[in-house]
Amino acid sequence: MSEPRFPNTPPKKLTPLNALIFSSRWLQLPLYLGLILAQCVYVFHFWVELKDLIGAAMGNADSLKHLLDAVTVPGAVRPTILNEATIMLVVLGLIDVVMISNLLIMVIVGGYETFVSRMHLQGHPDQPEWLSHVNASVLKTKLAMAIVGISSIHLLKTFINAAAYTEKVLVAQTVIHSVFLLSALAIAYTDRIMTTTQNASKTTH
């Protein structure tokens, strides 16, 4: 059975210097509040894109123009109607926004819980499953996997418009995505080694 994170012993009184240094963690609070505002911007952007998609499907010319301006890359043939490829690109853009939003939530909630203050969500019905065992290493691994997912969406969007890109750009984006993937695997493998080492150390003691 693992040791409790907070042992049932009264905390020692901190010296003024230690208390000041420990309290400096609250300087991160404005950063997380700023990320919440960024989350609001993404929510607004999502609904604007969705409104334009629905409007274009209903035959609104202005909505279609907004969508084509957003998804058509320079050099690509600009369609005159809402076709399947345009719908796919818009939906991929919406998925991209959702995945970035998920990434923001992991940074805001996980980062605040890990580096600023406990949120005491134990027993809450909506507590994220990953938050119960979150630490800096777990958070880093989850962020790396989220970045790989976002990169996959962007790479898929590039392949759909492959005719508008040069071979050099396609190869470069594929290599960059592969580097993200290898980095995520390396982070996960390193975390596994550290976890195994810690468990072995606890067993021997």
Image: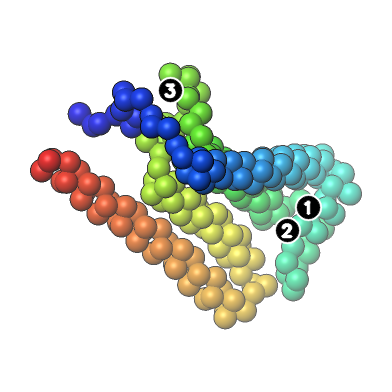
* Residue 133 or residue 155, whichever sits in front: 133
Compare residues 121 and 22 and report the one nearer the observer: 22
State the residue in front, 24 or 133: 24
Instruction: Give the labeled residue for mark 3.
Output: 122
> Where is mark 1, residue-wise?
67
**Are dots 1 and 2 in contact, CB under 8 Å?**
yes
Q: Is residue 29 visible?
A: yes
Residue 40 image point, x, y percent: 72, 40
Residue, x 74% and y 44% (percent of image)? 41
Q: Amino acid at mark 2?
A: Val
Badge 1 marks a residue whose secondary structure is helix
Picture quadrant of residue 189 = bottom left
Of circles 1 and 3, the one toward us is 3
Quarter of the picture containing the N terminus is top left
Q: Amino acid at mark 3?
A: Gln
Q: Which residue is mark 2?
A: 71
Number of numbered discs visible in the structure rendering? 3
Residue 81 horizontal side relative to residue 23, left or right = right
Nearest the viewer among 39 and 84 is 39
- Residue lying at 79% horizontally and 40% vertically, measured from the top left: 51
| Residue 39 visible somewhere in the drawing | no
